[in-house]
Amino acid sequence: MAPPAPQLPTVDERLESADDGTIKLRMRTHDGHPIEAVLMVFARGGGGPDDTRTLPPRYTACLSSQSGCALACTFCATGAMRLRRSLTSAEIVAQLTELATLCPTRIDNVVMMGMGEPFHNYDAVLEALRELADPRGFAIAARRMTISTVGWVPGIERFARDDFPARLALSLHAPSDGVRAQLMPVNRRFPIDRLMAACADYCDTTGRSIFIEYLLLDGVNDSRAHAHELVELLAQHDGERARFHVNLIAYNPAGTPYVGSSVATVHAFRDTLREHGLETSYRVSRGRDVAAACGQLASQDVSRDLAHRRGERVGRLEERAQRPVDRD
Ligand code: SF4
């Protein structure tokens, strides 16, 4: 007898950015857990200053590996949801299938940067990526897929020995344990020294470099001193081959106390890294008008749900105590 067909997530809501064409899907698993999938459009110019051609845009799909996340990074809307559950490989592939129906051409790149820590769901994520690479299906090259980890060391060590050659991105976001632990509780379990040793091992074993993701937060991790610390940290672990490419990221406000750094601060930070020979790019947040930061849309849904339940609870307390209740 054939195995039962997997139960796939459905689309609750589709939002399209008027600013940059980003499409965000709020989806729901068959058992009611929210997830998100995002399609980003990147316009491309010609090959140089004298080349006025306009090349076709590139499309990147950003997929979720989990509903919610257990790692509770303090700047992240998904972290505030906590973990609902990990997704199956079919649920991950289904996100791309939905996005593909909205994409005018083929999807060029896949990034596992949506909700969840991909290495907390290693087997399903790798199974999904292998399926997306299948030449009989979407045929997306492995080198055009990126797994983004918050620094889950056992996952990095395992991925270094996996035969699937997707790219690796590390959400570092701070050059020292003090600042990083404040932003990312996972740093208490895997401090920077241990994390960077795993990254160096990954580079040595695979011959591939790592994208270092660095979210710039006003007054938290964005000073020139932080930039110099980052230069030193990466230099300590740099090898013969180019190992690190730094992506500076503008913070997409996500209902947290953090504020993104000013453009002048971002440029100063970038220039310091470049002056020291670090390959650095600056990624402007996409889809701000459709709440495109990781987990923002789904967590709004969860917040509404929680607010509703909290309201009900407060109502019951008020009934019982016959006096105002100002906290739950
Ligand atoms: S940033 Fe990533 S790892 Fe951290 S809480 Fe959000 S989804 Fe989880």
Image: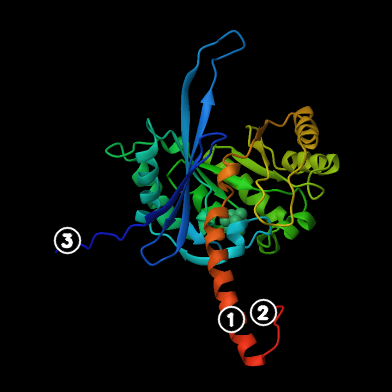
Question: Where residue 193 sits: x, y (%)?
Answer: 72, 53
Q: Amino acid at mark 1?
A: Arg
Circle 2 sits in a helix, a strand or a loop, which is it? loop
Depth check, mark 3 against mark 2: the one in front is 2
Residue type for callout 2: Asp
Mark 2 to mark 1: distance in Å? 8 Å
Q: Is residue 253 shown to the viewer in this render?
A: yes
* Mark 1, other Cα within 10 Å: few <14 / some 14–19 / many ≥20: few
Q: Is residue 63 visible?
A: no
Disc on the earlier residue, 3 or 2: 3
Tell me if label 3 and label 2 are in contact, CB under 8 Å: no
Most foreground residue, 7 or 204: 7
> Where residue 138 appears, x then y in whole percent?
33, 38
Which residue is nearer to you in this view: 206 or 9? 9
Q: Quadrant of the C terminus?
A: bottom right
* Dot 3 alpha-carbon crowd within 10 angstroms: few under 14, some 14 to 19, many 20 or more: few
Tell me, for residue 328, which label it has, or none: 2
Provide the residue designation for mark 1.
Answer: 313
Kind of residue indicated by mark 3: Ala
Indicate the quadrant where residue 102 lies. top left
- Circle 2 Cα neighbour tier, 10 Å, few/some/many (<14 / 14–19 / ≥20): few
Q: Name which of mark 1 and mark 3 comes first in the sequence.
A: 3
Residues tagged 2 and 1 counted as in contact (Cβ below 8 A): yes
Q: Earlier in the sequence, mark 2 or mark 1?
A: 1
Say the numbered circle drawn on residue 2.
Answer: 3
Callout 3: SS: loop
How are the residues colored?
rainbow
Task: Tell me what residue is drawn at x 36 percent, y 50 percent.
Answer: 94
Residue 204 locus on image (x, y percent): 58, 41
